[in-house]
């Protein structure tokens, strides 16, 4: 998302530094506003428990976008570290749904995958939908919690996110055809970039595993 | 939800097919979903190139086209569309300044919507664009028919004039002669008229050759040098 056009100044170090500061500040403020909106929706959800599932969906979506602005507000440049993105979204979903989400991150510490500025919101919303979907279709364990495992492998030019839950896929499920049936994955279909991202959802290890592979141009190299 | 109405004979009415084009996939996804909820059939394209390809392949009823896109802008897509198809389109713009409105009009847009757009604004815009597109289609068809009729009429008139001159007839009798001949030959009056005009044109090209223009020109040149 292009936020604003900060006027180009003389290309001195000072002006570039000022520009970065302004951009980071704008990201920071947008994050705060979005969190404020999410807070208002949360109040409605508490007051009207009958609409809570719908509100929770909207809240996690807003918070996923807020997380991107939060991360973009922390560092120079507007690319987003994939590991930070996954951790932030997983944490939001866990707080809201009381699910136990166990992230396992293996990243090249020197050069972890960075998601390009223009694709960060779309990827965040896709991850949010997939994690929410995993929680929704996961059975409740003995301690009354749902358990979701997330694995992230992140390197400079490629990354993979695996989301596992102990649910079951519907008979004859096919992700490619799921858009036609109009189920909850339609947003994922629409947001999934044509280049540099692929998604598979399959039965594995007694549950359901969703695997998203990312590569350039979604993973920013330069 | 009038798009899903059943016809009286029990067959289902054809759903209006809308192609939505926007490089911001979040905007694209929400627009597409909102329009689908109103009963339209929606295809999505996140770039100008994909939009053009899809439009030519699937021939949608109407296109919602974002103006500001990288590589191939909405205006460029519109230009190609107008050259190749008659699909009506509506521009989606981030700002509604006079220049954008002027450009949208020049590129043949049926309308433009300033983002962010609510689905309640889009549906009437789609219906208006469809209605105007249909009117334009009918107008173009009428124009083609009139042009053809005019061309036919011109050739017939010329042929009648030739017959009037050659056969010393008045215009009604000359036309009757042309029509009767065409009927006897089981041909259209226009075709007979065209043939007559071509024959006269050919005859007019044949002119008497002037003395001195015949013979070997090289020989003439040589003799003049001597």
Image (cartoon, coloured by chain):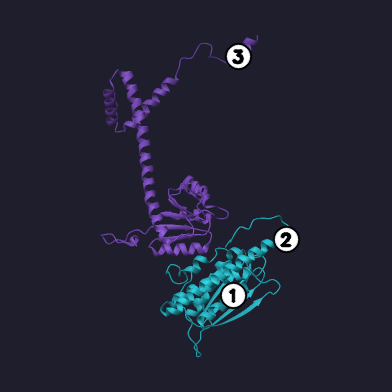
Chain colours: A cyan, B purple
Q: Say which chain tag 2 marks.
A: A
Answer whether labels 3 and 2 touch (C-beta < 8 Å): no
Task: Using the image, name the chain to which the residue with label 1 belongs.
Answer: A
Q: Nearer the viewer, residue B68 or A219?
A: B68
Residue extending farthest bottom: A142
Subunit that carries the residue with mark 3? B
Q: Earlier in the sequence, mark 2 or mark 1?
A: 2
Q: Which residue is mark 2?
A: A14
Judged by depth in the image, the label closer to the viewer, 1 or 3, is 1
Q: In the picture, which quadrant includes the C terminus of chain A?
A: bottom right
Q: Residue at (65%, 10%) from the top-left corner?
A: B225
- Kindly identify which numbered label has been placed on residue B171: none
Residue at point 31%, 20% (across, down): B164
Residue under label 3, please give it. B219
Q: Are marks 2 and 1 on the same chain?
A: yes
Which of labels 3 and 2 is toward the front? 2
Residue B145 placement: quadrant: top left
Q: Is residue B218 left or right of residue A109?
A: left
- Do the residues at discs 1 and 3 belong to one chain? no
Q: Is residue A214 visible?
A: no
Residue A115 horizontal/vertical position (percent): 62, 67
In three-dimensional space, the C-alpha distance between marks 3 and 2, rounded to whole angstroms, equals: 90 Å
Dot 1 falls on a residue whose secondary structure is helix
The label nearer to you, 2 versus 1, is 2
Residue underneath mark 1: A86
């Amino acid at each position: 998302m292009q936020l604003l056009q900060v006027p180009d100044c003389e290309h001195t170090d000072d002006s570039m530094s000022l520009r970065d500061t302004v951009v980071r500040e704008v990201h920071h403020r947008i994050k705060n506003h979005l969190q404020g909106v999410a807070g208002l929706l949360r109040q409605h959800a508490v007051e009207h428990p009958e609409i809570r599932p719908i509100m929770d969906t909207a809240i996690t979506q807003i918070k996923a976008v807020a997380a991107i602005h939060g991360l973009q507000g922390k560092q120079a440049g507007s690319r987003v570290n994939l590991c930070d993105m996954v951790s932030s979204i997983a944490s939001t979903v866990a707080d809201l749904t009381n699910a136990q989400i166990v992230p396992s991150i293996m990243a090249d510490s020197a050069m972890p995958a960075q998601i390009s500025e223009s694709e960060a919101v779309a990827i965040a919303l896709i991850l949010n939908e997939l994690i929410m979907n995993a929680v929704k279709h996961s059975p409740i364990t003995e301690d009354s919690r749902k358990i979701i495992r997330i694995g992230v492998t992140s390197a400079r030019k490629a990354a993979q996110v695996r989301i596992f839950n102990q649910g079951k896929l519907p008979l004859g499920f096919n992700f490619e055809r799921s858009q036609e049936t109009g189920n909850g994955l339609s947003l994922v279909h629409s947001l999934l970039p044509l280049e540099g991202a692929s998604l598979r959802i399959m039965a594995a290890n007694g549950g359901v595993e969703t695997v998203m592979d990312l590569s350039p141009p979604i993973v920013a190299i330069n | 939800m009038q798009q899903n109405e059943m016809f009286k004979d029990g067959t289902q009415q054809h759903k209006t097919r809308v192609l939505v084009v926007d490089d911001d996939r979040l905007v694209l996804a929400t627009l597409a979903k909102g329009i689908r909820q109103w009963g339209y059939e929606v295809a999505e394209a996140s770039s100008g190139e994909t939009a053009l390809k899809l439009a030519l392949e699937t021939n949608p009823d109407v296109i919602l086209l974002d103006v500001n896109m990288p590589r191939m802008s909405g205006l460029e897509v519109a230009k190609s569309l107008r050259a190749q198809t008659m699909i009506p389109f509506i521009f989606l713009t981030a700002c509604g300044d006079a220049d954008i409105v002027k450009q949208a009009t020049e590129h043949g847009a049926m309308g433009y919507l300033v983002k962010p757009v609510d689905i309640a604004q889009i549906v009437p815009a789609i219906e208006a664009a469809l209605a105007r597109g249909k009117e334009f289609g009918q107008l173009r068809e009428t124009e083609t028919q009139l042009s053809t009729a005019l061309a036919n009429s011109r050739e017939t008139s010329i042929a009648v004039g030739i017959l009037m001159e050659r056969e010393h007839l008045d215009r009604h009798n000359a036309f009757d002669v042309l029509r009767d001949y065409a009927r006897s030959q089981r041909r259209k009056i226009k075709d007979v008229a065209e043939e007559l005009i071509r024959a006269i044109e050919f005859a007019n090209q044949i002119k008497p050759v002037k003395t001195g223009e015949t013979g070997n020109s090289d020989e003439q040149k040589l003799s003049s040098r001597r």
